[in-house]
Every structure is written in structure tokens, then in C-alpha cells.
Image: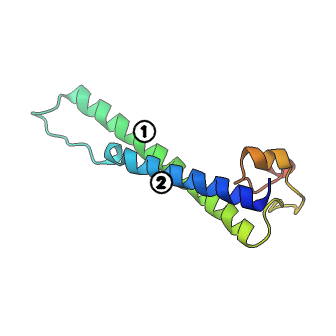
């Protein structure tokens, strides 16, 4: 995978993550605790859904940070090289996930 192909794939994934976050924004809003309009079990269920939506957003933010770091490596002409040992990252590994920063040996 060339750096240009990786850049395109990374930017596409970043845009998809931002769109997912926009669509899921409703699930992360605070849960109303109005005793009269919602039963206790319904509130607990709503709080669990909110917690899952917040956890999903944290995972999205983490993935976006990995993507941004990979884009920076492309700009710095360091894409495809392990950040720990400096060895080349296997092309198949990069094709699967161009945001990886480490070779398989260092990732273990």
C-alpha cells in the first residue's frame, strides 16, 4: 500500500467515524430522571444505553487519534516503519489497517 493509498483510506475512515459520532450524538445526552414520566427500570435502561454510547465515542476518539498519528507519519515520510524498532511494517498488515504504528513483533 502506497502512502497516498493509505492516506485516502485513513481520511475515508476518519470521515466515517465523524459521521457515526454525529448520528450517535443523541445517545450520549444526559438521561432525564423525571420520576413521574419514566419508570425506574426504563431509567436504568436509558442510563445503560447512554453509558454504551459514551464508551463507543471514546473508542471512536481513540481510533481518530491513531488515524491522525498515521497521517502525521505519512506527512513526515515515516509511514510503514515501526515506531519502536524502526523496521518495516509488513505490507499486508498496513493494507489491513493503515493506522498501525508497530510491526507485529513490537505490537505483541
Q: Is residue 19 left or right of residue 97?
A: left
CB under 8 Å between callouts 1 and 2? no
Q: Position of residue 57 (x, y in %)?
A: 46, 49
Q: Camera-side residue: 5 or 82?
A: 5
Residue 13 shows in the view: yes
Residue 82, numbered circle: none
- Image coordinates of residue 55 in percent, x first then y, are 47, 44
Dot 2: within a 10 Å radius of its alpha carbon, few (fewer than 14), some, or many (20 or more) residues? some
Location of residue 81 by image quarter: bottom right
What residue occupies the far bottom of the structure in this picture? 76
Q: Is residue 51 above or below residue 41?
A: below
In the displayed structure, 33 sits above or below 11; it is above
Give left or right: position of 80 versus 61. Answer: right
- Which mark is nearer the camera, 1 or 2? 2
Q: Which residue shows up at 24% across the image and 33% down it?
A: 43
- Callout 1: helix, strand or loop? helix
* Element type where label 2 sits in the image: helix
Q: Nearer the viewer, residue 25 or 30?
A: 25
The answer to whether residue 108 shows anywhere in this view is no
Q: Quadrant of the C terminus?
A: top right
Q: Of callouts 1 and 2, which one flags the residue occurring earlier in the amino acid sequence?
A: 2
Kindly identify the residue that appears in the image at 30 percent across and 48 percent down: 29
Reading the image, the residue beneath label 1 is 52
Residue 104, image x, y percentages: 83, 47
Please tell me which residue is depicted at 36% across the width and 35% down the height of the picture.
48
Q: Is residue 76 above or below residue 58?
A: below
| Inter-mark Cα distance, 1 to 2 | 17 Å
Residue 36 falls in image quadrant? top left
Q: Dot 1: within a 10 Å radius of its alpha carbon, few (fewer than 14), some, or many (20 or more) residues?
A: some
Label annotation for residue 18: 2
Residue at point 53% right, 48% down?
A: 59
Amino acid at each position: 500500500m502506497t502512502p497516498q493509498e493509505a492516506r485516502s483510506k485513513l481520511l475515508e475512515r476518519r470521515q466515517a467515524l465523524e459521521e457515526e459520532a454525529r448520528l450517535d450524538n443523541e445517545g450520549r445526552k444526559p438521561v432525564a430522571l423525571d420520576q413521574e414520566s419514566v419508570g425506574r427500570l426504563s431509567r436504568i435502561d436509558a442510563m445503560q444505553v447512554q453509558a454504551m454510547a459514551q464508551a463507543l465515542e471514546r473508542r471512536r476518539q481513540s481510533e481518530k487519534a491513531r488515524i491522525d498519528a498515521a497521517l502525521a507519519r505519512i506527512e513526515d515520510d515515516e509511514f510503514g516503519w515501526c515506531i519502536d524498532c524502526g523496521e518495516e511494517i509488513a505490507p499486508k498488515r498496513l493494507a489491513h489497517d493503515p493506522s498501525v504504528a508497530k510491526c507485529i513483533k513490537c505490537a505483541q
